[in-house]
Amino acid sequence: MPGFVSAYPSLAVQLPGAAVPWLRRSRDEAFERFAALGLPTTRDEDWKYTSVAAIARRVFRVDGAIEVSDEVRAVVLRHAIEGTQRMVFVDGHFVPGLSQPATLQATLPEGARVGSLAQAVEARADDVEPLFAAAGDAADGFSALNAALWSDGAWIDLAAGVALEAPVHLLFVTTRSDSASFPRNLIRAGEGASATVIEHHVGPDGASYLSDTVTRIVLGRGARIAHTKLQQEGRKAFHVADVAAEQGQDSAFVSHALAFGGQLSRAAIATRLGAEGCDAKLAGLYVGSGRQHIDHHTCIDHAAPRGTSRELYKGVLDEAARAVFNGRVIVRPDAQRSDALQSNRNLLLSEDAEVDTKPQLEIWADDVKCAHGATVGQLDADQLHYLRARGIAEGDARALLIRAFAADALAGIEHGPLRARLESLLPGALPEAA
């Protein structure tokens, strides 16, 4: 992506916080890191099965202008989720007029700040700086590029004891082909605070574009954050995401990662159980057909005693789709009495579908309870025969078995309208499930 190297000096002065010294330094350092790293290649172990050559040779444009047309409004209404507070970002920029309510802050409890990261940087840069510091260094070229070029995203800051009753729905809409957007979300929950956040990415099927997104979450003592990432990009889109959480004592982090769209998508999801008594639950469902490539890399880092983690990722692949799953669980030497369970299960509906799965356990403590496993298989012929023998058409029987296979990956989603939406997406995502 050499175009970004030459364009950065002119882009940097137009980005939010360009006049804020610490942020300008942060952007410059991140861009220097991107220039040094470049984009990952298949020679990098974590990218061994995912080539981003198609992204590297493309020229994407970053344009600050946005257009809110009737078509965009229709897209927002189509993807709205009942019972949530919605924040809408179009081509990487917050649009208050499409959000509901338009002024989020007026409906929030005292001690809760929810809004545009770009606006927060301009209005209260000193309040936002600690969250940037907590985000840590960029892990690869994509996250470095996001740190340099982010244009907007959500800023959610909850004081101690604050609980958001309604989920916050962050809806990111891409409208233009050959464009690149860099959403960045920063979420902090103080001691005992709690919230549910739905991060939702959509775009048109006919457009080829790049969405490079980063989300950072910091949980204080006893805090709870449930984060759902729903990827419904257009079928020609490229989507690269990096989600990382840092957990304080007795905190709970719940992550659901759902991938349905995109020509090539990659999600890295990590949490660090950094103090005693943390709990982490990671679940995912990826569904692919055609020649889609879907990659999930997860990391659960038990860095302190008495941590508990549960991870279940499931994949359903048809035609010539390919998936990659790499789940890493680390138990550090001081993390005694950790309890970790990890599972990846895959259902292949055609002979050409393929999955590369690699669950990993790295245990450096001796008083632990850990297990992991992976399976790859097809629909059970006996179950299919059982349903057909009772008068159920073959297509309906296959769809029923696929939904049953995927069900427990969605079971932990507490918001009923969101869970119902996800269940409704599965039949349309696969030709065999229609």
Image (cartoon, rainbow, N blue to C red):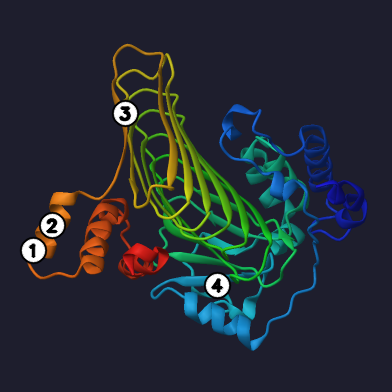
Q: Quadrant of residue 87?
A: bottom right
Q: In this image, 430 relative to 397: left or right?
A: right
Numbered disc 1: secondary structure:
helix
At x 47% / y 76%, what residue is drawn?
80
Numbered disc 4: secondary structure:
helix
Mark 2 and mark 4 in contact (Cβ < 8 Å)?
A: no
Q: How far apart are marks 4 and 2 (CA)?
A: 53 Å
Rendering coords of residue 72 (x, y %): 62, 81
Q: Earlier in the sequence, mark 4 or mark 2?
A: 4
Q: Name the residue under label 2.
A: 385
Mark 2 and mark 1 in contact (Cβ < 8 Å)?
A: yes
Q: In this image, 391 relative to 218: left or right?
A: left
Q: How far apart are marks 4 and 3 (CA)?
A: 42 Å
Q: Distance between the residues labelled 1 and 2?
A: 6 Å
Q: Name the residue under label 4.
A: 104
The type of residue carrying mark 4 is Leu
Numbered disc 2: secondary structure:
helix
Classify mark 3: residues with Cα within 10 Å, few (<14), some (14-19) or many (20+). some
Q: Quadrant of residue 400?
A: bottom left
Mark 1 and mark 4 in contact (Cβ < 8 Å)?
A: no
Q: How far apart are marks 4 and 1 (CA)?
A: 54 Å
Residue 389 is tagged as: 1
Q: Name the residue at the top extreme.
A: 366
Rendering coords of residue 393 (x, y %): 19, 70
Rendering coords of residue 28 (x, y %): 84, 42
Q: Name the residue under label 3.
A: 372
Q: Name the residue at the bottom extreme.
A: 70
Classify mark 2: residues with Cα within 10 Å, few (<14), some (14-19) or many (20+). few
Q: Which of marks 3 and 1 is nearer the N terminus?
A: 3
Mark 3 or 1, which is nearer the eye?
Answer: 1
Q: How far apart are marks 2 and 3 (CA)?
A: 31 Å
